[in-house]
Structure formats: C-alpha cells, structure tokens
Image (cartoon, coloured by chain):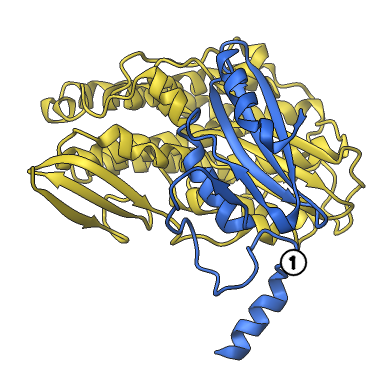
Chain colours: A yellow, B blue
Amino acid sequence: MSVTRINVGPIHPSTHGVIRLVVDVDGDTIVNVEPHAGFLHRGVEKLAETRMYMQIPPYTEKLDYVAPMSYDEAYVAAVEAAMGIEVNEKAKYVRTVLLELQRIASHLLGLGTLCNDIGQMFTVFMWTFKDRDIVLDLLQEATGSRMFYVNMRLGGMHAELPPDFAEHAYNTMNYIEKRVSQYETYVEKNTAFMERMRGIGVLSSEDAKALGVAGPVLRASGVNYDARKHSPYYMYDKFHFNPKVMLTGDNFARYKVRMLEMKESVRIVKAALKAMPEGSCLGMPVKLRSPNPVNRTVSVSRELPRGECMMYLVADPQKPYRLSIRSPNMVNLAAIGHIAKGARFADLFGILGTLDIIMGCVDR
Amino acid sequence: MKIDRGQLTNQVSRLKAAGFDYLVKITAVDYVDHLEVLYFVRDIAASKDEILEVTVAPSDAWVPTIMDFHLSADWYERELAEMFGITVKGRATARLFLEKWDGADPPLRKSFVWDAQYRTRDVKK
C-alpha cells in the first residue's frame, strides 16, 4: 500500500466554506480524512459574555448564515427560558411557520450545492436557488430582511405579519411542494446522480450514535430522533409531526431525508397558517436592560435544518455569564473521516455535500 | 448529577450500558474559583437526557478522557483543552482545534479579558 496525501482547501469550490481536508489515499481509495477547522472562528461564545442579552442575536445568526433565523430563535428561546418568559400564543404559530420556511430555504440550497458537488454543475443549483429566493421573499415580507433577520423578541416577534402573508405563503407552499416532487423526479431518474448516491458513504445507526452526528445525517442512519418530536416546542406536537427516517445511511438516504423534510415542512406551514389565532404576536421591545433571569442555568434544544443545536446558558443579570453552543455541523463534520473511509476520492465531495455543513457554525 | 472526576469513566460506562449511548456535548464553565465540566448524554429511545457535572480546581485542571465510550468526545475534548486549558488525560495529544492564542490564557477562562487582550495585541503590532 502506498499512501498519497492530498490537501483540499482551505478554499475549494466544494468545501462549503473555509475548511481544509487532509486526505490520505491509496490509489483513489480514501484511507483517512482529517478535517482542519477554525478558519472562521470568531469567538462568538466569548463575545456573548461581553454583550447585553438582546445585543447577541446578530452574532448567533451569523453562525449558520444559510439558516440564520433558526439560530436566532434557539438563542432567544434560551434567554426566555432563563427569564421565565412565556411566548405569546400567536407568536408560537408565527415562529413555527417562519422556522419551517427557513428549513425549506436551507434544504433547497443544500440540494443545489449537493448537485454541484457531484459534478452536475449549476443546473439544479439555479433551479433551487430561484425557488429559495421565492421562500426568502416570504421571509422578507414577514421580517423586512432577506438574509439576517433578528426578528425574534423576548416573548414574541418584532412585528406583526402583513395582512396578505397567509395567502401568499399558502400559494408559495403549493408551488414548493410541486417543485420538490419535480426535483425528486429529475435527480432520482438521473443515473449519474444515483450512481454517486446509492451505497456511497454508508454510516450505520450504531456508528451514527457513537459519532454523535445530528439532524438529517442521524435520521438517515435509521436513528429516530428529532428535537421537534422528542422535546416538542411551539406547535409541533399539535400538527402530528413525524420525523423522517431512512435506514440505509448512505448518501442517498441523507439526500432523501431532506427532501421528505421539505414536504413535511410544507405540511406544517400550511397547518399552522390555517390554525393561526387572532391577536398580536409582538414580543417585548428591545431595550438595553432586560428582565433579570429567574433560572441561573438553562439548556434548550432546537432542531435546526442541519441538526440539533443545544444552547446552554448560565445567566447573570443583563449579560450571559456563559453561552455554550452545541453545533450540529461540528459533529457532522467530525464524522467525515469515518464515513469517507474506503470510499473513492471523487466521492468525498458527494459525502461532504450530503453532510451539508456550514463552517461558520462549526468554528463559532 | 454532580460526580467526582475519579468516578467519571465509571459513570459514563454505567450510563452507556443503561441506554445513554448518545453524547450530546461536553462543555465547561469557568466559575473563577472552580471549573465545571459538563457531560450531556442522552438515551434516544427513551428521550431522556442526563447531565454529569465534574468540578475541578483551576490549578489542577484535568479530566479523564471518555473516548473509550463515546467517539464523538474527540472534538469536544480538544475544545476543552484549547478553550479552557483543561488537560484531558488518557488520550493522544491532540493537534490544534480552532485557533492559536499567542500564549495568552485559554480564551473561555474568565481571566482572558476580551477587550484588553485585543488592545495589547494591537499595540504590539
């Protein structure tokens, strides 16, 4: 056996951010992959200790810049738990809708970049990017911004939804549902796509648990865990939400779980829009001084598009004493050495694409 | 559950045998007079979490590795070492995880003062 070492990155079109992979190959079979993280480390956890509570969401949002609202909500939920603030009834529905829209936008981009990674350059990416923009239009209507929202307030939202939002969202969800089915047909009938998905990068359920992977990667390996189901928050338990689980643990399973999740998200958004109560969803206005915490330590779990994030907050008056963020992307990236071992070098990027990592979240 | 660091591996092993076979995360908090290392483990089937809290003195900051039970502890333990200066005994010395800090205090210790460190660095440049 003669091992050649190949250096991928730190900047590479297929690396989903700034990451360096040191890959040992024998011929074109991968022997070992060692990911080097840290290029996007901004010290958000330390920074949080120097800021007032409601000055922090703009930082936490930028951890996962493809699904910023999900991180925003996870942080605000931790602060609400520490301060004993109850979210108002309508805001629970509004948050459920917006978080699921964010999940759809994130998964659409994930599908596009996955197709890029395995060499189907920019055809599917352009379609999904266009559809993601339509979802972002909705988020813009609701929040006033397309990328970074900062729209969560303690106990509610920063603004009411526009009057025609429900109708617009309902029509968009019909369109997205149709498009997701079309994407499934397009890519799953494509031999080049399927050859690089089926049976590649298999992760068994035992290994998935031992490696601590999260979110769609965990569920694709047959482990039925979704924070939305197992520690339900907002309106998820009301809509009979079921986690999407696949058993094969390969690239295809990881891709398919995300497609099924998009359809489930469409269903949840429609149900939440239909059941949304009257009234106001406004939270507390942002002031520099926040209410004092009633709980010293809290940990809050949220199912982000890329997996479970746990915010562990040690609360002092006005500022966090310590904010610890469990990054789903970090655990998924850490598993790549195990998943890619024995695969061919060309499949490394397909595997990386199905892990769908965001480096800002890994490095924090 | 507060435990002594000498019991850590036994407790992790016991919990794993009892179904808590998924490590959610390891983190630490610097309370200045002591450091608290937290291990979050989960029984996925029963949807139950357990938190193990190990207290160590800043002058004697080490914990045993739990990589024999949870492979996913690897990156978290590297983070503990780098961000909190907590030595993890019983495992190979890990390479740098996130960032090189110019010999200053570990960044997530309270003795590392964010603003002052940055000003000092700027002046040095």
Q: Nearer the viewer, residue B92 or A119?
A: B92
Badge 1 amino acid: Ser
* Residue depicted at 38% across the width and 40% down the height: A109
Decide: few, some or many residues near mark 1? Use Cα within 10 Å; few <14, some 14-19, many ≥20. Answer: few
| Figure check: A168 above or below B45 | below
Can you identify the residue that label 1 sits on?
B111
| Figure check: A165 above or below A49 | above
| Figure check: A115 above or below A233 | below
Q: Is residue A124 left or right of residue A205?
A: left
Q: Nearer the viewer, residue A351 or B120?
A: B120
Q: Quadrant of the C terminus of chain B?
A: bottom right
Name the chain under label 1: B
**Residue A107, horizontal then vertical, whole percent:** 42, 34
Residue A202, quarter of the rendered image: top left
**Residue A362, horizontal then vertical, whole percent:** 48, 48
* Residue depicted at 18% across the width and 40% down the height: A30
Residue A26, quarter of the rendered image: top left
Residue A163: tell me if it is visible. no
**Residue A204, horizontal then vertical, whole percent:** 34, 20
